[in-house]
Every structure is written in structure tokens, then in C-alpha cells.
Amino acid sequence: MVLGVAAKMSQMEVDKAVGLPRLSRVAVCGGTHGNELSGVYLVRELLKEEKEEEEKEQKPLSVMLVLSNPWAVQQCRRYISTDLNRCFTHAMLNGPASDTTPYELLRSRQLNALLGPKGSPEAVDLICDLHNTTANMGLCFITYSDHDWICLHIFKYLQRQMPDIPMRYIHFDVSNKESYSLDSVGKHGFAMEIGPQPHGVVRSNIYTAMKSGVQHMLDWVRLFNSGTIFDGEYVDVFTMVKHIDYPRDRETGNIIAAVHPWLQDRDFCLLHPEDPLFQTFSGETLKYKGKEPLYPFFVNECAYYEKSIALSLARKRCVMVPPIRVQTDEERQAQPQELASEEEE
């Protein structure tokens, strides 16, 4: 059994599970990039369904639904002035503002006030930020932690519920202060990245996969809050090691090669030293000169040309995730005292 109801578990099984706080406040965000349309249309659909549920006086799980970058959504652009999904570092959220402050930086502070403040007890418990990629990546969770048991358990639950969709868990090893994306504002958070889908386009299969992923995520939260115990799991985690830029002309800086046909659309297929990496516009094959095999992802992502990234490379390892359950009332009441004791020590 992967999961069981707490009432049916032995006391030993209950005791060995890690007790974590209830997820009372969940946010689902779309349109952080205004031309990534699956999240835009899904949030709009969920807002419509929420209104219908309110009219029926039903009380589903309370979820905050947010269109993150409404101006960019209106214009079907990635952003207006600067990339909103790079505006959530501690310094950017807390710096001075003026008449020349970019719109997205102002918007990041509005979102931080709505969903955070980042790093505070008042922050929402879980943020799921919806994204599309032009790369052939399937459904990915992108997070800043390889030991956030909530996000890892949600990921494994989606893998079981959606066996026909390729899924990977990507870890960016960045500190909380330097974490830059919207999902970092919550106590727990991840970007749900699904592709391939062109920007400015919505494909029904990609939209449907995202909708199923969000529904299963919310189902998991309900199960967790109701007392379900989730057994320990092993999860393959892809930790980002480095980015690789396109080959460029030394004088002009212009790109002189494209991703090699052998590598195109082969995200998460192991790239070995001397494998084809780029093909120059004159037809020459350029090989991967790294010292170790690594896993490519975001291969030839359209939006990353401006960031000088042709692909990213990750190292894979298996992480043991412990069994978890929601905290008991006694544990929750004792927690502040325990924290106070630790601070005194």
C-alpha cells in the first residue's frame, strides 16, 4: 500500500511518520508568463468553476486562484518590462521603488503581499505556479529543495495517478534569499512545467495534462489534511548543474549553431561526453565536451534564447522521502514551545 488512512494504521506506523503542519492555504497561479496559455486558461476555468460552486453553496477545498501577470496575459506576451519569474529574490522584493521601477517588479511585490510575505509565518502553505515550455519535457516539478517532503510526496502521487505522462522532479540548488520565482513565496511551492507547447498557443493535450495535475495535487492536499498517512518513497531528483549557451561568433555575438538534430526533443536522455551537441549553420557537428554524463533539459527552449541558454544539464540521484502525515493538535500546540526552547539553547 502506498497510502492508508491513519485510523487503520498501527500506532508504530503513525509514530514513524513525520508530522507536518496542515496545508490550510493553497494558491494556484497561472500567467506568470503571459504567453504560456495552459495556466492562463486553466486558472480562468477554475475561477469559473469556483463561482458556480459558490452559487450552489458547496464548500470545496479553499484555493486562491491568481492570474499572476495580468498585463502580459492581456497582450499575450511573456512579460511587459522584465521577467516576472525572476523578481522574487529577497533583494528585489525589499528594495526601493520609484517611477521608473519596472511593472513586473511592482507586481512581484503585490503578489508577495498577497501570498507571502516570503519567508514569513503568514505566507500561504503551498503555491503551485503553472508554466509551459517549448521543450519536450513532459510534466516537471521545479523546486528549490530536494528535501521538501510535501512537494516530493505530491510529485509521487501525480506519478501514480497519471502513469501515461512522463514526469520529472527538478531541483535548483538556490538559497531562499536568492530563489527568484513566484513559487518560492510560499512555505512550500513548485512550478508545474508542461511541454512541449509553443508560446502563445494552447494545445488540448497539454492543457488536459495540466488540469489533471492540478486536480490530483488538490486531491492530495485533501487526503493529507484529512489524516491520510503517506508511506515512504524513493524519488529520482534531477539537480541542475549548469547551463550551456549556443556557440556564438566572437565578434558579433550572434548564434552560429543550433541544437543538434540528435539531441533535439531528447530532454532527460543521458548526454555523454563526445555526443553530438550542436550543428553549425555550415553543417559542422560540435560535440559535448563535459567530463561526465549529465541529463539535458529545457533543450532549445524558445524563451531562453534571450537568457543565452541553449539547454540545462542536471545530475540525477535517488532521494529517500520519509512517510508523512498531518500534525496532531498536540504536536501543533507543542511546536512553538519547542522552537522557543531551541532559540534559548
Image: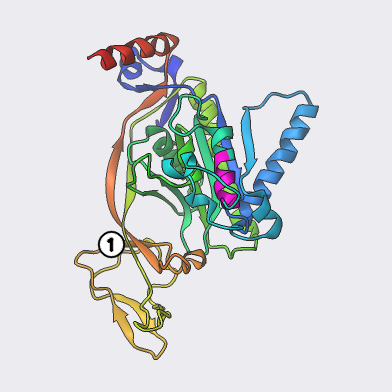
Q: Please determine whether, in this image, residue 138 is positioned above or below residue 16.
A: below
Name which quarter of the figure residue 25 lies in: top right
Q: Nearer the viewer, residue 130 or 12?
A: 130
Q: Quadrant of the C terminus?
A: top left
Name which quarter of the figure residue 82 lies in: bottom right
Q: Please determine whether, in this image, residue 290 is positioned above or below residue 39.
A: below
- Residue 214 in sight: yes
Place of residue 243 in the rendered image (x, y in percent of width and height, measured from the top left): 34, 63
Place of residue 250 in the rendered image (x, y in percent of width and height, measured from the top left): 34, 82
Q: Nearer the viewer, residue 340 or 331?
A: 340
In the orientation shown, which residue stands out farthest toward the right? 55
Q: How is the image coloured?
A: rainbow
Place of residue 321 in the rendered image (x, y in percent of width and height, measured from the top left): 32, 35
Place of residue 10 in the rendered image (x, y in percent of width and height, measured from the top left): 35, 15
| Residue interval drawn in magenta | 101-109
Q: Which residue bears the numbered disc 1?
A: 294
Q: The residue tagged with tag 1: helix, strand or loop? A: loop
How many numbered marks appear?
1
Q: Is residue 61 left or right of residue 297?
A: right
Q: Please determine whether, in this image, residue 116 is positioned above or below residue 277.
A: above
Residue type, label 1: Leu
State the residue at coordinates (58%, 65%). Answer: 198
